[in-house]
Image (spheres, rainbow, N blue to C red):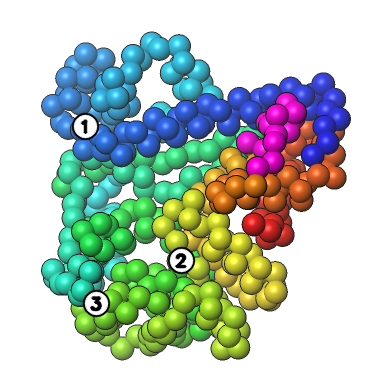
Amino acid sequence: MKFQLDKNAQEMLERLLEINAYSQEASDLLSAFLDGHFDAIDINLLNRLRKELSCSLEDAYYPAFLSVLDIDPEDEELKKIEQNTAIKTMARLDEGEFLANPYLKAIRFPDRKEGKWKMTKNYYLPYEAFLYNQTKARREDLYLPVDFLGYFDKKVDYPLVEENNHVWMSVTPYEARTMEEGIRMAHGKVLALGLGLGYFPYMALRKEEVSEVVIVEKDPGVISLFKKNILPQFGKKKVTIVKDDAFSFMKKKEAKDFDFYFFDTHSTPEDALIPYREYLLFKKENPQKDMAFWIENSTLVYLRRLLMVLLQEESEGLYKETFSRDFTDRLLSSFHHQLAETTLKTTEDLLDILDDENLRQILRESKF
C-alpha cells in the first residue's frame, strides 16, 4: 500500500487503529472471562453488588464481570476501553423465547452414543455468560466490533453432540440467532453444507417456500447419529443426506441444481476463512443463485482485524514479509502483494479498503 494521506485521513487512520486496539483489548477480556469464568457470576454476587451500587440486578452484571476478572472499575486503561468499545453491552435474555423455538419444542434428545460421537444435553446455570449473537461492525461506527454477551436468570437446558467428550455442535441462542438470516432467505430446493444437529434443515423446511433440503456431511458417525435419533422426528419433510466433503461436492455438476445454498462447515471465524473463500468463489461463478454463509459478519470482523494489522505495519514502515507456513502470515503476505499498488489518500479511501465488499474481494482473490 502507498500512503499519501491528507491531514483528515491521517487523523482517521489514527482513530481506526485506536478503535481496533481497544476493541482487541475488550475482546481479550471477554475471551478470558468466557474461557475461565463463564459460570462465576451468581445471584449472591449480583445481590451484593446491587446493594453496594444501588442499582438493578441487570445493571450489576457488568460490575460483577469486572469483579470476577479482578479489574478495578476506576482503572484508567479500562475507562479508555469503555469509552472506545461496546464492552459494557451485556443483556439478560428471555429463556421463554429461546425455549419456544420450534426445533427445541419438537425434537427430543435422548442420550445416545455412536462411536466417538455422543448426543446429550447440557445447561446454562442462572447468570452463566455466553455469546448469543455474532460480532458485528458498521462503517458508520468506524467498524467498531460489537460482541453480544448474554445470560439467563434461570437454569436452561440445550442439546449438544460431543466428539470424544468435547462439544462439537449444539443448539443454543447463538446458533439460533446466527442462522436466522439463512433460514429467512431459504427457498425452493435447498443445499445445506454441514449437518450439525439438523437445526437449519428443520427450520428451513417449516417454510412453505422450501420444497426440500439436501444435506452434505462427510462424517459417517454424525450421519448415523442423526438418522437414528433426530431425522425420524422430522416427520414427512423431504430430507436427503449425501456423504461427501462439502467443497468436493460443490465442484460436481449436481451442485448447480439448487435454489438456495447454506454454508455451515466451520465453527469459528478463525477456521471460517478458507471455507469463506470457497463460498465467495462459488458465489462469483454463480451470481444468479441465492446463498448465505454462517457467521459471515463475525468472519468479516476477523478478516478486517487482520487487514488492520497490515495497514498499521505498512503505514509505519514496519511490515516485513516472512515466508512462514503459518496461515496468518501467508494470508498477510497475499494481502500485501494484492494491495501493493493501492494508494490511500482520503478518509473515504481508508473506509473503503476496510469495507465488507472490499474485504470479500481481497479474500476471494488471495493466494495462500
The amino acid type, in three-letter code, at marker 2 is Asp
Number of numbered discs: 3
At 51% from the left edge and 57% from the top edge, which residue is drawn?
A: 272
Q: Point out residue 254 in the picture as x, y percentages from the top left corner.
A: 56, 88
Crowding near pointer 3: few (<14 within 10 Å), some, many (20+)? Answer: many
Considering only vertical position in the picture, is 120 above or below 23?
A: below
The residue wearing badge 1 is 41
Q: Point out residue 316 in the picture as x, y percentages from the top left corner.
A: 73, 26
N-terminal of the two: label 1 or label 2? 1
At 78% from the left edge and 27% from the top edge, which residue is drawn?
A: 9
Q: Nearer the viewer, residue 18 or 108?
A: 18
N-terminal of the two: label 3 or label 1? 1
N-terminal of the two: label 3 or label 2? 3
Crowding near pointer 2: few (<14 within 10 Å), some, many (20+)? Answer: many
| Left or right placement of residue 315 versus residue 94 in this view | right
The residue wearing badge 3 is 225
At 64% from the left edge and 37% from the top edge, which residue is drawn?
A: 308
- Report the disc number at residue 264: 2
Q: Nearer the viewer, mark 1 or mark 2?
A: 2
* Residue bounds of the magenta highlight: 309-322
Q: CA distance from mark 1 to mark 2?
A: 32 Å
Residue 256 visible in the displayed image: yes
Crowding near pointer 1: few (<14 within 10 Å), some, many (20+)? Answer: some
- Report the disc number at residue 50: none
Q: Quadrant of residue 225?
A: bottom left
Q: CA distance from mark 3 to mark 1?
A: 35 Å
Residue 99 visible in the displayed image: no
